[in-house]
Image (tube, grey):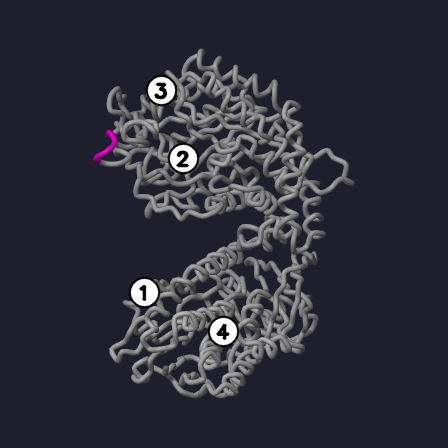
């Protein structure tokens, strides 16, 4: 085959040498715009796993690279006058110029033709090529030419960064955070050879503008950074090799994702994208070069698998795209998380967190490194952090004992202390008759209270018969229901050390529907016996399916507010330890808050402040009659997942308003406000909402949604992303989820009910045996 690689970066060079090695008969050319052995940039970072992959494919190249590598295991944080270090992270760094020189020399040794100082405007410049590999970088001309086929999604990120270097050497991957009068700057620092260190400085656009850096030339920007990081640099100078850039040397990162990666052009040549031309990964995770190298390996692997003829190319490219698309999206998602962390850390973490927790948050920023993964990397550091974390909780325990995982630390709010951070989430059971909780709920909630969680929530309980979602929903609109709940609460208090919470709500436009297993299923109107619906506006949940509710009058608001107050009094009399107001998921109070469902033109519509007016009135009236010593929370939909609906920034404002009204915690859920929603699911996918609300609104939060194992809970709690974690479906499958997860991670200090204690050592032994056999 005749192969032309447009772009002489790591992707093009490495693919060229691999193909020439696999079949010397291939005619392989790599075309580069720069001079021979010339390049821009400083150092690049690989993981140990990438090097293992390269070693398998071309030992000569990997040996040459390893001789030039700087390897380190430690990450060091410089923050608020502290220096904190953690080990076991396994990175390798090399100068970009040195890396390219090694690849160029290996290409020449194998017979790959290298063409320098040549600008390639189009794949059409090589009409006789069987395969054109477009690895021409983030501003790829080939991708632009065929944008209608490749369909690139390019997002310009808000932070500014400048890529510098210094001759001061560092023995760890170092992060230095410095505060100025206008905000925070951070430096990403790593040595890549025996003389030079990469020194990337980053800050939000607003901070960059406030310091006038938009008007600074490269020399002035360097002088600013030298002064800002003077204590770190200790007299060493900063350098740039980006003199080729016009204007400001400060850049915005561009995230690139392409829908398709290859095509056949008008000359019959196949054109495929590789490296930054098809995807980018932020330097916060250091994976851009890794992605490019592994693109080259995968494409070569597909040729090795399917054949090296021209006829094999379409199948090879299809399989290449399918294989790499999944992996690159995984890494891009992790890089996105890390990138966003650095973009918001000045507003969200730098001022709020102490250095120890800030370090933990930074280490776990991509969500690829979890609590137990940190234990594998640096057990001593993590156990020290666990002791630090536990020391800031109301934990009465011998400090000589092993460290306590964060999920098993107690948490205090008002006069209530929860034994751990695990919450059984409110989960609708639709199993009441006339709103009456009875034996089913006693068994259901009692079993989960015995399972080890610190707090158990009853499902959303309705304040009147016409407030129900379904005929099977529980209620608190009469004293008989109060007494039914009291029986359950008394049982939980008598037989367990868990606390129990009531969640009050009103279905609003989503009422008078089936239980999920009845008739047409959830959110569909009852076939008979429907009741009238109320909402903020006369808008059905799903037009053409659900009944149209009546827009509430002021008299309706007064009546329903008083229903909530009466139910609150009954919840207090029943002995509940905690009360939550349901303002999420498109139910009545949520319907007032979301602009998707509130189209009023009076004092309760329009701005977010107005839309919150009545929900806050309800909450304040409830707080006034709920015992002062007992906590109250509010569940919100922090994201409607529909354009024009509530978003995370709105959630912060909502949380601040409820905090001012006396809320102790915000339970951060999302969605279910509109059937048009398009959520982005994934593990812990709603936790970022709890994190943002907690840091920016300054109120405790509960994370919920796809939290399914102890590692998730420990990571969330330890990083300060939330104070509690609500676990839903796993608790349906296993009422003793908390005990099970404690045994899995080897934490034996959890107290089981006396009746169940004989099972504890067996479970712990079984998990220990499984772990030893891995």
Residue named by callout 2: 584
Question: How far apart are labels 1 and 3 at the CA level?
Answer: 54 Å
Q: Nearer the viewer, residue 672 or 56?
A: 56
Mark sitting earlier along the chain (4/1): 1
Q: Is residue 62 above or below residue 532?
A: below
- Residue pictured at 49% horizontal, 17% vertical: 485
Residue 513 magenta-highlighted: no
Label 4, residues with CA under 10 Å away: few <14, some 14-19, many ≥20 = many
Read off the magenta span.
Answer: 544-548
Residue named by callout 4: 249
The tag on residue 559 is 3
Secondary structure beneath dot 2 equals: loop
Q: Is residue 476 above or below residue 289?
A: above
Q: Position of residue 79 (x, y in %)?
A: 65, 57
Secondary structure beneath dot 1 equals: loop
Label 3, residues with CA under 10 Å away: few <14, some 14-19, many ≥20 = few
| Residue 23 in sight from this viewpoint | yes
Q: Quadrant of residue 712?
A: top right
Mark sitting earlier along the chain (1/2): 1
Q: Is residue 553 left or right of residue 772?
A: left
């Amino acid at each position: 085959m005749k192969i032309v690689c447009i772009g002489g970066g790591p992707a093009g060079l490495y693919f060229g040498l691999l193909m020439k090695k696999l079949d010397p008969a291939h005619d392989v050319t790599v075309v580069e715009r720069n001079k021979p052995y010339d390049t821009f940039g400083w150092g690049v970072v690989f993981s140990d796993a990438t090097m293992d992959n390269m070693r398998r494919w071309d030992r000569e190249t990997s040996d040459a690279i390893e001789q030039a590598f700087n390897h380190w295991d430690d990450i060091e944080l410089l923050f608020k006058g502290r220096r904190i270090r953690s080990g076991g992270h396994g990175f390798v760094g090399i100068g970009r110029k040195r890396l390219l020189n090694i690849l160029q020399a290996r290409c020449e040794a194998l017979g790959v033709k290298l063409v320098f100082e040549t600008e390639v405007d189009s794949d059409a410049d090589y009409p006789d090529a069987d395969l054109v590999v477009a690895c021409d970088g983030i501003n790829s001309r080939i991708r632009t030419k065929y944008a209608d086929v490749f369909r690139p999604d390019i997002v310009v990120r808000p932070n500014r960064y400048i890529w510098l270097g210094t001759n001061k050497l560092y023995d760890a991957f170092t992060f230095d955070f410095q505060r100025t009068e206008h905000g925070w700057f951070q430096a990403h620092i790593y040595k890549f050879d025996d003389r030079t260190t990469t020194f990337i400085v980053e800050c939000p656009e607003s901070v960059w503008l406030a310091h006038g850096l938009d008007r600074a030339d490269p020399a002035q920007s360097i002088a600013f950074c030298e002064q800002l990081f003077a204590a770190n640099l200790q007299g060493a100078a900063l350098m740039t090799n980006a003199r080729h850039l016009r204007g400001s040397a400060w850049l915005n990162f561009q995230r690139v994702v392409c829908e398709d990666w290859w095509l056949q052009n008008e000359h019959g040549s196949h054109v495929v994208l590789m490296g930054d031309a098809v995807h980018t990964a932020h330097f916060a995770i250091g994976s851009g070069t890794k992605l490019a190298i592994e693109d080259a390996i995968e494409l070569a692997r597909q040729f090795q698998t399917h054949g090296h003829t021209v006829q094999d190319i379409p199948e090879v490219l299809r399989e290449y795209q399918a294989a790499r698309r999944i992996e690159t999206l995984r890494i891009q998602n992790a890089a996105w998380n890390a990138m966003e962390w650095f973009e918001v850390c000045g507003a969200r973490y730098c001022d709020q967190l102490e250095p120890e927790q800030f370090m933990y948050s930074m280490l776990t920023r991509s969500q690829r490194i979890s609590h137990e993964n940190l234990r594998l990397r640096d057990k001593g550091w993590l156990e020290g952090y666990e002791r630090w974390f536990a020391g800031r909780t109301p934990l009465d325990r011998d400090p000589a004992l092993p460290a306590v995982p964060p999920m098993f630390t107690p948490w205090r709010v008002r006069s209530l202390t929860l034994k751990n951070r695990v919450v059984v989430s409110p989960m609708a059971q639709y199993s009441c008759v006339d709103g009456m909780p009875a034996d089913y709920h006693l068994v259901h909630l009692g079993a989960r209270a015995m399972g080890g969680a610190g707090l158990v929530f009853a499902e959303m309980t309705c304040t009147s018969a016409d407030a129900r979602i379904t005929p099977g929903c529980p209620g608190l609109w009469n004293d008989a229901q109060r007494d039914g709940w009291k029986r359950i609460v008394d049982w939980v208090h008598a037989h367990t050390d868990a606390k129990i919470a009531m969640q009050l709500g009103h279905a609003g436009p989503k009422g008078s529907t089936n239980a999920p297993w009845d008739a047409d299923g959830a959110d569909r109107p009852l076939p008979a016996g429907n009741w009238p619906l109320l909402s903020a506006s006369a808008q059905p949940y799903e037009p053409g399916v659900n009944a149209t509710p009546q827009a509430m009058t002021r008299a309706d608001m007064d009546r329903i507010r008083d229903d909530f107050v009466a139910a609150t009094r009954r919840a207090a009399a029943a002995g509940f330890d905690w009360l939550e107001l349901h303002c999420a998921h498109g139910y009545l109070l949520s319907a007032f808050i979301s602009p998707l469902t509130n189209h009023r033109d009076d004092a309760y519509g329009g701005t977010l402040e107005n839309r919150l007016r009545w929900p806050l009135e309800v909450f304040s009236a409830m707080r006034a009659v709920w015992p002062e010593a007992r906590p109250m929370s509010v569940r919100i939909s922090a994201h409607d997942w529909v354009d024009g609906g509530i978003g995370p920034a709105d959630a912060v404002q909502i949380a601040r308003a409820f905090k001012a009204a006396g809320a102790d915690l915000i339970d951060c859920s999302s969605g279910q406000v509109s059937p048009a929603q398009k959520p982005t699911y994934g593990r812990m996918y709603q936790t970022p909402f709890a994190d943002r609300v907690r840091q920016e609104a300054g109120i405790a939060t509960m994370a919920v949604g796809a939290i399914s194992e102890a590692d998730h809970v420990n990571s969330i709690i330890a990083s300060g992303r939330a104070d509690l974690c609500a676990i839903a479906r796993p608790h349906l499958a296993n009422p003793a989820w908390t005990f099970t997860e404690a045994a899995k991670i080897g934490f034996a200090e959890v107290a089981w009910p006396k009746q169940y204690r004989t099972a504890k050592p067996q479970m712990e032994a079984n998990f220990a045996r499984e772990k030893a056999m891995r």
